[in-house]
Image (cartoon, rainbow, N blue to C red):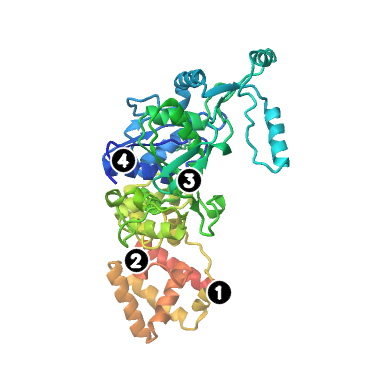
Amino acid sequence: MTYENIRVRFAPSPTGPFHIGGARSALFNWLLAKKTGGTFVLRIEDTDRERSSRESEENIKAALRWLGMDWNEGVDVGGDYGPYRQMERLDTYARYTEQLIAQGDAYYCYCTDEELETERQALLAAGKMPRYGNRCRNLTEEEIARFKAEGRRPTVRFRVPAGKSVVVDDQVRGRVTFDSDGIGDFVIVKSDGIPTYNYAVVIDDALMKITHVIRAEEHLSNTPRQILIYEALGFPVPAFGHISLILGKDRSKMSKRHGATSVEQYRQLGYLPEALVNFLSLLGWSPSGEEEILPVEEIIRQFSLEHVAKNPAVFDVDKLNWINQHYLRKLSDEAFADLCLPHLVAAGFVAAELTPEDKAWVVQVLALAKEQVSYAAQAPDVVRLFFTDDFDFETEEAKAVLQDETAPAVLELFAEKLQALEVVDGASVQALLKSVVKETKLGGKKVYMPVRVSITGCQHGPELTHIIPLLGVERTLKRLRASLAKAQA
Ligand code: GLU
C-alpha cells in the first residue's frame, strides 16, 4: 500500500486514567504518521460533560509526551483545523445539524426517556432487538406544537435510509457489511444541544481531513452510523482500521484484575517509556523478523497496517518485564539510580535531598540491583540490606547456617582479617575470603555462607565482593557479631 499525505488522529475522551489500550491506539496512529511523514492530530472528545475533566486531559497529554508521541496538530499546539476540543466546536456541529434537518436527513425527536424505555422493554419482551421505532420521523405541525407546549426539549435524530448495505472496508478486519435496517434512527444531538460521539466524530474527522481512522475494535459497530453521516453530508469517507481488543493472559478482556491498566501506573512503577512503546507496538502488530526488542526508529521503519493482526492481542506482563529489563540494563548507573531513587525515598531508605557523597554511594548500591529488577519499584527490596542494620534471617535455613559449629571460628577469622585490611575493595575482599577458606581448610561454602548470612540475613543476593566495600568495615563487623549472637541465642 502507498500512503500519501496521511492525516491520522488520536481522539481520547478525557474521562479517567489513560488506559494502556488508548496508548496502543495512539501509538499505531503515531507510527503510521511517522512512517509516512504524515500528520498526527490530537483531538479531545470532551462532550461527556459529567465525566470529562481537564485533569484527565492533562494526564493523557503528559503520558503521550512521556511516551514520546508528539503531535503535530491539535490541543496545545494548534493547527489549521482547530479548535481541537469538541466542546469548543459546538457552533460547527450546529451548522451541520441545520443542514441535515433542511435536507431531511435529520429530524427533531420529542420522545421522553420514559417513552423510549417503555418502547425498549416492549421490544425486548417480544424477543426483538431494541431499536428506536422512528416515532417522531413524520410528526405533524400540531404534534410538534403540542410537544413544544408541553415543554419537551427535543433531541435530533439521523434518518437512517432503509434497506441499505453499509460496507466498511476495514484495513485490519477486511470487508464488513452492515444492514441499515438493523439501525434505528439514532440521536446525533442530545436535548441539551451537545452532539453525540457518532456525530461529532464524523464532522471533526471530515473537517480535519483525517485520511485514516485507526481505533479500537469496539468502535467497529459505530462505523456504519458514521459512514451514513459522511454520505449524507457529502464528505469523503476516510479509511478505517479497527485494531483488536487487548485481552489479559487468561484471555478475558483486560481489566484491573490483570494488574496495572493505566500508563501512569506503569510510569510510577518505574517502567521506561521506550520499553512500554516497544511492548505496546507488539500488541497486535508483528515485526518482520524474529527480533522483538526494537528501538522506536526500527518500529517506525517496519510498521504497516498490513501487519496488524485481526485476532486479539494478549497483554503479557512477563513479556513487558522482559522488555523493560532489557532497556533498564542499558541505562547508565546514574540514570538507573535516578529512576529508582523516588522508590528508595518512598521506602524511607534515603532522604529526598542527598549530599553528593551519599548520592555517589547510593548510585553504586543501586547498580547492584540493575540486573535483578524488572522495574524500578522493585529496587528497594533488592538493596534493603544496605539501609537496615537490623534484619531478621530470611529463613530458618539461613539461621541454621550460623548455628553450624564451624561458623563462629570462620566469622572470627574473617572479622580479624577485615579489620586489618588497608584497602577495602572487591579485589581485597575476594583475596580475604580465599585466604579464610585456605586457612580454615573448610570448603568455600562453609566460609561464604556464614559470612553472607551474617551480613544480609539471606542465602542469596549480590556478590559479597560488592556488598562489603559498600557497607564498609564498621557496619560489616557490627552485623557479623549481632547475627552470630542472634543465631545462637
Ligand atoms: N473518543 C472516542 C474514544 O475515546 C474516540 C473513538 C474514535 O477514535 O473514534 O473512544
The correct choice, above or below, for 111 with respect to 238 in the image is above
Q: Which residue is mark 4?
A: 33
Name the foreground residue: 58 vs 416: 58
Task: Give the CA separation, mark 3 to mark 1.
Answer: 53 Å
Disc marking residue 396: 1
Nearer-N-terminus badge (3/2): 3
Q: Residue furthest front?
A: 163
Q: Which residue is mark 2?
A: 466
- Left or right of 395 on screen, residue 130: right
Disc marking residue 217: 3
Q: Are marks 4 and 2 in contact (CB under 8 Å)?
A: no
Nearer-N-terminus badge (4/2): 4
Residue beneath the point at 46% across and 31% down: 201
Q: Secondary structure at mark 3?
A: helix
Residue beneath the point at 69% across and 38% down: 123
Q: Are marks 1 and 4 in contact (CB under 8 Å)?
A: no
Task: Give the CA separation, mark 4 to mark 2.
Answer: 48 Å
- Left or right of 334 on screen, residue 280: right
Task: Give the CA separation, mark 2 to mark 1.
Answer: 25 Å
Nearer-N-terminus badge (2/1): 1
Q: What amino acid is labelled 2 in the image?
A: His
Quadrant assignment, res 289: bottom left
